[in-house]
């Protein structure tokens, strides 16, 4: 290896240096050949997979490298970018980039060990702008390497990412590029979906959790009180896919004979009600106001026989006026219950947020011990021109032309191609992940539905004949001893939160005061004092970050803005223009403080109601204890 590269790797990329220790024995030097180009510079020739492919021009590698970078000149002219190079080759195009854009941060991902070995043996890393080089990664045939790298890059800063691929590298090593593209698409979709979801629901999750908290205090925690209670007992998870219509009589048989517990998810409850097949429980968690429409039919008809299992961050309108019994499961998005509640010294069990109630309910059934879990109506795809079962009057079950135009193909349970959309397909991928993570025994009995890895397909009639062969249902299954929370802890946490809520306005006032001082100093050009004020701002912000009301209420309501702030601040620290640095700091923090301050005002009444609910619950328990003597 080039002697300068050894020192650089030891100090900058020690983990890569450790991998390189085994590179000589692991790599295959015969797949590459070093040649001299007509210009005198070296070029690499890939020998694997048919005809030789030159990774750089055999005439003038430097001229070719310039053309590669020039093709991205519009993207590279933008501000606040981070360049990601796929395929290092001998690094000519990256060297050209560094000469033209020496201060633009960049990272390198090389998936072929032999290529990286040739680079490190023949080129000097110091030819690159080392201060701007953020990461140098050796990938491989595992998608995990690419996913991990991309997650770090995307989460490390708020800068726009510009991806530059070495064209010849893509042609020479198509398998590695396919893995890279798959990882890039996956991370991109996940990141975009996550940001959109968080931005859409970040305030709603917290508002729901605050409004629902008195309901949480007065209803049983099913995950705590029934955890593992149904071990080895079958359950049927009934979703609202279009195949549900053809399974009604089979579900009626299961319910009437007590062959398994029926849990409906989402809109399936309405199809079941229309056919007088009442599930043993309906499950819900959607945080939107629209979710209340799912249970409008139950409320209008006054049906009291169907228990509701609700996620604690569910849209609060859903719980209002629900006529049947209720119990709750704490969701990962509920920072209120997590602060106030505990049962002994054990951590409260939760369900993790997911893109569908079916995935949430799979987690629930898994923790309760149900096995096997039978999926019915879980199409996760279109059936003809429909994507919902009948009996759902608030949702158009027929596909529009726009939906059909955007459809994608997936494999169904019988190996055929069917159409679905990105949202349903993402639900399927997440469901597969949780089935594997929890080690669930799942039978997919959805006729014509999408294939779900980790499940086995079996028609419901066959499941009834071979698996659900005897009664297992306890008609009194929905009986609880009551919430078993530590109410002394609840009382102390309530007092702590009141104190933290009272402190916050002064903390934000201190933050604004520091920003005004920075603004005044910037106008006077007193940048030496501004640097000292940055330390003061950090101190004030740390005090805000450690405030419990901020952590439980304001931070979750502004999580997207907070992540953006943390990412951009890391970049601002390296800004060399003191005035530009001051302007960016003031804009960033003032925007975040303003958003949090607005939410602090808007949640004041909700916080008062929450405290009233706690006081009423504690008073009721005290009176009950006194009555019992």
Image (cartoon, rainbow, N blue to C red):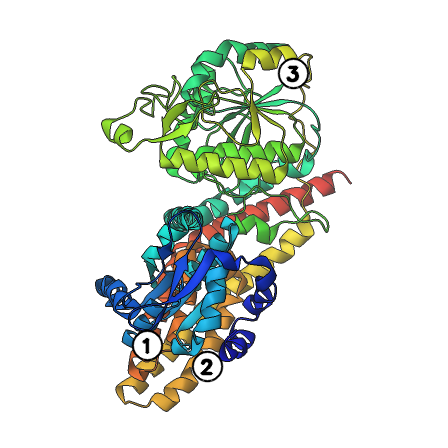
Q: On the picture, is 53 further left or further right than 151?
A: left
Q: Is residue 426 visible?
A: yes
Report the residue marked by disc 1.
102
Residue in front for this viewpoint, 504 or 149: 149
Report the residue marked by disc 2.
535
Residue in front for this viewpoint, 258 or 46: 46
Mark in front: 2 vs 1: 1
Report the residue marked by disc 3.
467
Residue in front for this viewpoint, 594 or 582: 582
Give the residue drawn at x 56%, y 18%. Answer: 458
Kindly indicate whether the residue at mark 1 contacts the one at mark 2 (C-beta within 8 angstroms).
Answer: no
Q: On the picture, is 529 further left or further right than 617?
A: left
**Quick one: SS at disc 2?**
helix
The crowding category of the residue bearing disc 3, from other C-alpha atoms within 10 Å (few below 14, some 14 to 19, many at least 20), is some
Q: On the picture, is 413 further left or further right than 38?
A: right
Image height check: is 17 above or below 333? below
Which of the two discs, 3 and 1, labels the residue nearer the N terminus? 1
Q: Using the numbered discs, state the Cα–Cα distance from disc 2 to disc 1 in whole angstroms.
A: 29 Å
Question: Which residue ends up furthest to the right in the rendered image?
Answer: 629
Kindly indicate whether the residue at mark 2 contacts the one at mark 3 (C-beta within 8 angstroms).
Answer: no
Q: Using the numbered discs, state the Cα–Cα distance from disc 3 to disc 1 in whole angstroms.
A: 67 Å
Which of the two discs, 3 and 2, labels the residue nearer the N terminus? 3
Question: Where in the figure is residue 541, as x and y percent of width and height?
Answer: 46, 72
Q: Quadrant of residue 515?
A: bottom left
Image height check: is 157 above or below 4? above
């Amino acid at each position: 290896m080039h002697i300068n590269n050894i020192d650089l790797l030891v100090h900058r990329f020690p983990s890569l240096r450790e991998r390189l220790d085994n590179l000589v024995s692991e790599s295959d030097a015969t797949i590459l050949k070093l040649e001299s180009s007509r210009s005198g510079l070296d070029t690499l020739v890939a020998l694997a997979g048919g005809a030789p492919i030159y990774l750089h021009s055999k005439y003038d590698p430097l001229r070719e490298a310039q053309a590669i970078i020039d093709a991205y000149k519009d993207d590279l002219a933008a501000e606040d970018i981070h360049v990601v190079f796929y395929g290092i080759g001998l690094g000519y195009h990256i060297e050209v980039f560094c000469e033209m854009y020496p201060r633009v941060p960049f990272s390198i991902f090389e998936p072929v060990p032999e290529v990286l070995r040739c680079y490190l043996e023949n080129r000097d890393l110091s030819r690159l702008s080392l201060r701007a080089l953020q990461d140098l990664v050796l990938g491989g045939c595992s998608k995990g390497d690419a996913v991990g790298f991309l997650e770090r890059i995307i989460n490390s800063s708020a800068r726009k990412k510009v991806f530059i691929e070495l064209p010849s590298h893509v042609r020479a090593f198509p398998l590695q590029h396919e893995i890279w593209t798959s990882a890039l698409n996956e991370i991109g979709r996940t990141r975009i979906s996550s940001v959109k979801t968080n931005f859409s629901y970040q305030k709603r999750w917290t508002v729901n959790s605050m409004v629902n908290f008195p309901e949480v205090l007065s209803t049983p925690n099913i995950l705590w009180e029934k955890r593992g209670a149904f071990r080895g007992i079958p359950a049927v998870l009934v979703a609202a896919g279009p195949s549900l219509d053809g399974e009604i009589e089979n579900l009626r048989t299961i319910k009437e004979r007590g062959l398994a517990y029926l849990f409906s998810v989402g809109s399936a409850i309405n199809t079941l009600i229309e056919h007088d097949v009442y599930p043993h429980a309906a499950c819900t968690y959607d945080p939107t106001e629209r979710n209340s429409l799912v249970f409008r039919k139950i409320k209008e008809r006054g049906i009291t026989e169907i228990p509701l299992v609700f996620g604690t961050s569910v849209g609060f309108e859903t719980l209002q006026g629900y006529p049947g019994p209720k119990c709750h499961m704490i969701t990962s998005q509920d920072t209120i219950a997590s602060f106030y509640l505990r049962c002994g010294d054990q951590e409260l069990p939760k369900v993790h947020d997911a893109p569908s109630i079916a995935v949430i309910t799979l987690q629930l059934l898994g923790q309760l011990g149900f096995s096997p879990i039978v999926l019915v109506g879980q199409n996760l795809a279109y059936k003809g021109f429909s994507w919902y079962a009948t009996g759902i009057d608030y949702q158009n079950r027929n596909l529009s032309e726009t939906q059909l135009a955007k459809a994608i193909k997936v494999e169904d349970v019988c190996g055929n191609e069917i159409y679905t959309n990105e949202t349903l397909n993402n639900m399927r991928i997440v469901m597969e992940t949780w089935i594997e993570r929890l080690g669930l025994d799942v039978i997919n009995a959805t006729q014509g539905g999408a294939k779900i890895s980790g499940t086995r397909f079996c028609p419901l009639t066959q499941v009834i004949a071979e698996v659900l062969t005897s009664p297992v249902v306890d008609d009194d299954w929905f009986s609880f001893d009551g919430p078993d929370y530590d109410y002394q802890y609840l009382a102390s946490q309530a007092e702590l939160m009141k104190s933290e809520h009272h402190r916050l306005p002064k903390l934000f006032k201190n933050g604004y005061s520091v920003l005004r001082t920075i603004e005044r100093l910037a106008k006077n050009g007193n940048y030496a004092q501004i640097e000292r004020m940055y330390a003061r701002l950090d101190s004030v912000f740390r005090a805000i970050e450690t405030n419990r009301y901020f952590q439980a209420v304001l931070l979750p309501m502004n999580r997207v803005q907070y992540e953006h702030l943390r990412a951009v601040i890391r970049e601002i620290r390296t800004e060399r223009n003191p005035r530009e640095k001051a302007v960016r700091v003031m804009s960033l923090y003032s925007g975040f403080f303003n958003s949090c301050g607005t939410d602090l005002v808007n949640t004041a009444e909700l916080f008062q109601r929450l405290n009233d609910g706690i006081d009423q619950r504690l008073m009721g328990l005290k009176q009950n204890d006194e009555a019992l003597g």
